[in-house]
Image: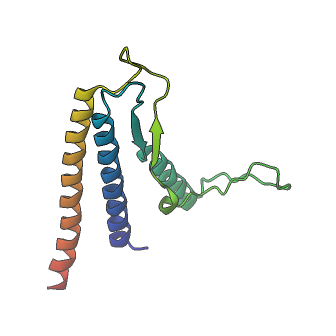
Amino acid sequence: MNSFSRSVDMLHRALDVTTLRYQVSANNLANSEVPNFKRSEVNFESQLSRALASEKSAASGESFVLRTTDPRHIQSSGVTDYTTVQPRRVTDWHSTSKANGNNVDAEEEAMLILKTQMNYQLLTAMENFQFSQIKMALK
């Protein structure tokens, strides 16, 4: 995959994750006063970082692959393709910040929504820049 395709693919993935993150935060905010509601968040960047690091170490020859002689052994492919990484929705079941059992802070969720919107605008500007470079090269 060339660098343009990879960049656009990663931007599309980031936009999808940002959209999911916005939906999760909006759901948290909508349920901020519901008794026993637990907030959720989206984890993606750490898994993507791990996958990209495994690809980099495999390309440089530093990867460590476990040898398995039995199907019951721990399987290790050594390299994780970044395209297989999916966002995970994680619910915080352990904390409680209100007397009704709810753990959503409405102000914090509103700030997360604002941050997510700004991140989305940045990502769309970056994608627009990628395609403007191609358009300029084609002229």
Spot occupied by residue 97 in the image (x, y as percentages of width and height): 37, 18
Residue lying furthest front: 35
Q: 12 or 130: which is nearer to us?
A: 12
Instruction: Report the colour scheme.
Output: rainbow
Q: 20 or 132: which is nearer to us?
A: 20
Tell me the residue at 42%/30% (across/down).
38
Tell me the residue at 66%/51% (across/down).
64
**Residue 59 appears left or right of 122:** right
**Residue 61 appears left or right of 20:** right
**Residue 127 appears left or right of 37:** left
The answer to which quarter of the image holds residue 124 is bottom left
Spot occupied by residue 122 in the image (x, y as percentages of width and height): 20, 53
Spot occupied by residue 40 in the image (x, y as percentages of width and height): 41, 37
Tell me the residue at 39%/73% (across/down).
2
From the viewer's perspective, is residue 82 above or below residue 134? Answer: above
Q: 90 or 55: which is nearer to us?
A: 90
Q: 37 or 111: which is nearer to us?
A: 37
Q: Quadrant of the N terminus?
A: bottom left
Q: Quadrant of the C terminus?
A: bottom left
The answer to which quarter of the image holds residue 70 is bottom right
Spot occupied by residue 42 in the image (x, y as percentages of width and height): 40, 43
From the viewer's perspective, is residue 106 above or below residue 137? Answer: above
